[in-house]
């Protein structure tokens, strides 16, 4: 039986399976909303850290954190999995992704341009611009873990 917006079929176990275009589109929209929400949160955090938005590393860092927050296994294998995934998204090489993220982090730490208090509230840990900048993997893991823990707890 087939309708314009809904289809029903019998499986071999004699169960009726109904698939609805409306259900699929709602699932897609909720997935898109989750992705946009996650991207907004990551953008807010990296802006508070003072990462300059005019450098490529800003976009690469945002994408890397969103991917790592969505799939924690990526954060465990940054060089082998995360950088290549970000590179594929932007038609770049993994080495360029790594270098541009590092440059963006160093720019923020050199200029001391971040809002330390706001960043510490968002990340739940102390931030010091007088120390050496964090490594790419440290910052990506810190932001993605903070997001995952904060929003899995319902905050």
Image (cartoon, rainbow, N blue to C red):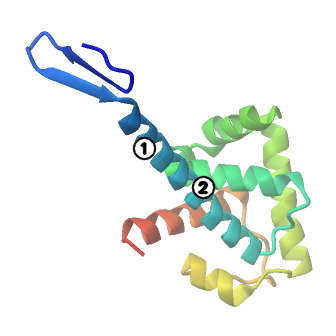
Q: Is residue 46 above or below residue 56?
A: below
Residue 126 visible: no
The residue lying furthest to the left in this view is 14
Horizontal side of 122 relative to 131 (left or right) equals left
Q: Are marks 1 and 2 in contact (CB under 8 Å)?
A: no
User: In which image quadrant can residue 102 be found?
Assistant: bottom right
> Relative to the observer, which residue lies in front, 16 or 2?
2
- Residue 58, image x and y in percent? 80, 58
- Residue 28, image x and y in percent? 48, 40
At label 1, counting other C-alpha atoms closer than 10 Å, the crowd grade (few under 14, some 14-19, many 20 or more) is few
Q: Earlier in the sequence, mark 1 or mark 2?
A: 1
Q: Is residue 104 above or below residue 71?
A: below
- At horizontal 80% and vertical 44% (from top left) the residue drawn is 97
Q: Is residue 30 above or below residue 2?
A: below
Horizontal side of 16 relative to 121 (left or right) equals left
> Relative to the observer, which residue lies in front, 91 or 15?
15
Horizontal side of 111 relative to 36 (left or right) equals right
Disc 1 target residue: 26
Disc 2 target residue: 36
- At horizontal 72% and vertical 57% (from top left) the residue drawn is 136
- Depth check, mark 1 against mark 2: the one in front is 1
């Amino acid at each position: 039986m087939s309708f314009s917006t809904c289809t029903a079929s019998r499986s071999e176990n004699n169960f009726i399976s109904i698939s609805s275009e409306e259900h699929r589109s709602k699932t897609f929209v909720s997935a898109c909303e989750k992705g946009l929400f996650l991207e907004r949160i990551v953008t807010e955090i990296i802006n508070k850290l003072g990462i300059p938005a005019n450098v490529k590393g800003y976009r690469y860092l945002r994408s890397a954190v969103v991917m790592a927050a969505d799939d924690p296994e990526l954060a465990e294998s940054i060089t082998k999995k995360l950088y290549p995934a970000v590179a594929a998204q932007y038609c770049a090489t993994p080495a360029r992704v790594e270098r541009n993220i590092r440059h963006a982090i160093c720019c923020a730490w050199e200029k001391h341009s971040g809002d330390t208090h706001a960043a510490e509230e968002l990340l739940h840990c102390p931030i010091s611009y007088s120390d050496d900048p964090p490594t790419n993997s440290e910052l990506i893991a810190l932001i993605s873990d903070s997001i995952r823990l904060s929003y899995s707890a319902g905050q």
